[in-house]
Image (spheres, rainbow, N blue to C red):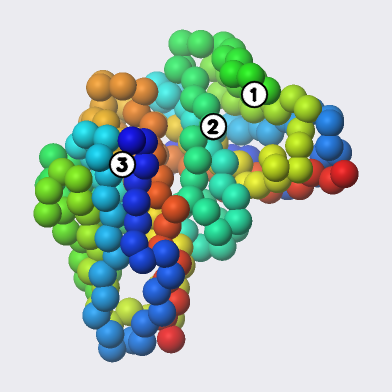
Amino acid sequence: DTEVTQTPKHLVMGMTNKKSLKCEQHMGHRAMYWYKQKAKKPPELMFVYSYEKLSINESVPSRFSPECPNSSLLNLHLHALQPEDSALYLCASSQLPGQDTGELFFGEGSRLTVL
Amino acid sequence: GEDVEQSLFLSVREGDSSVINCTYTDSSSTYLYWYKQEPGAGLQLLTYIFSNMDMKQDQRLTVLLNKKDKHLSLRIADTQTGDSAIYFCAERPTTTDSWGKLQFGAGTQVVVTP
């Protein structure tokens, strides 16, 4: 199984809503990532978890709250978002440095629209 | 931070070869990657090259690495309409506090015309 599964594929929410994005992988990877991608732009790193602990937070606003319940799951909790947060949110996973070639495996993304 | 640069657009005729170029600045990178992204989809790893290699070939794909000039290229032979996508090059830093921060280029939009 070389898949990273993200749900939902599409999400529309108002600025006062609370919602969550979910990501799952069963490749035994111990690093998981959240990226934000705007149209025609490269992905921008938001968070990195290694061994279920947050290791990198790229100064992301607190209205985005990541959670890693176990080594296979990664959530992104959303609250009080702004219209400019509308984007494709990509989850990825990888082995840790030195364990293999280090490539990231990406999910298909969750397309978020904030009204 | 380190910058990875790519040309933004490439138009190629079906059956011709495509060459996508990338320059990077972090001389300590160990692995360099090429990802493909089709509209509305996630990023798909196409191939990678280790920094001590000069070339890697995988079916229609050839990766060339010039470490002296920090230049990476991806050649796609016999380009097909299904190759139309955005192609990102990326490097993985080796510093302890940056290992998780894959550096992506801006992406090259490849359009294949019949």
Q: Are marks 3 and 2 on the same chain?
A: no
Q: CA distance from mark 3 to mark 2?
A: 16 Å
Determine the CA span between mark 1 and mark 3: 24 Å
Are discs 1 and 3 both within one chain?
no
Between the residue at mark 2 and the residue at mark 1, the CA separation in whole angstroms equals 8 Å
- For the C terminus of chain A, the quadrant is bottom left
Q: Is residue A23 left or right of residue B82?
A: left
Image coordinates of residue B76 in percent, x first then y, are 70, 28
Protein chain holding label 1: B
Q: Is residue A90 above or below residue B34?
A: below
Q: Which residue is mark 3?
A: A93
Chain ID at mark 3: A
Q: Position of residue A54 (x, y in %)?
A: 16, 50
Identify the element where label 1 is drawn: strand
Is residue A32 shown left or right of residue A36? left
Residue that carries the numbered disc 2 in the rendered image: B46
Q: Is residue B25 visible?
A: no
Going by the numbered disc 3, the residue's amino acid type is: Ser
Find residue B32 and report its horizontal and vertical position in percent.
48, 27
Chain at tag 2? B
Residue A55 position (above or below residue A75): above
**Which circle marks residue A99 in the picture?**
none
Circle 2 packing at 10 Å, graded few (<14), some (14-19), many (20+), is some
User: Of A41 and B44, which appears nearest the observer?
Assistant: B44
Question: Vertical placement of B20 versus A110: above or below?
Answer: above
Nearer to the camera, A98 or A25? A25
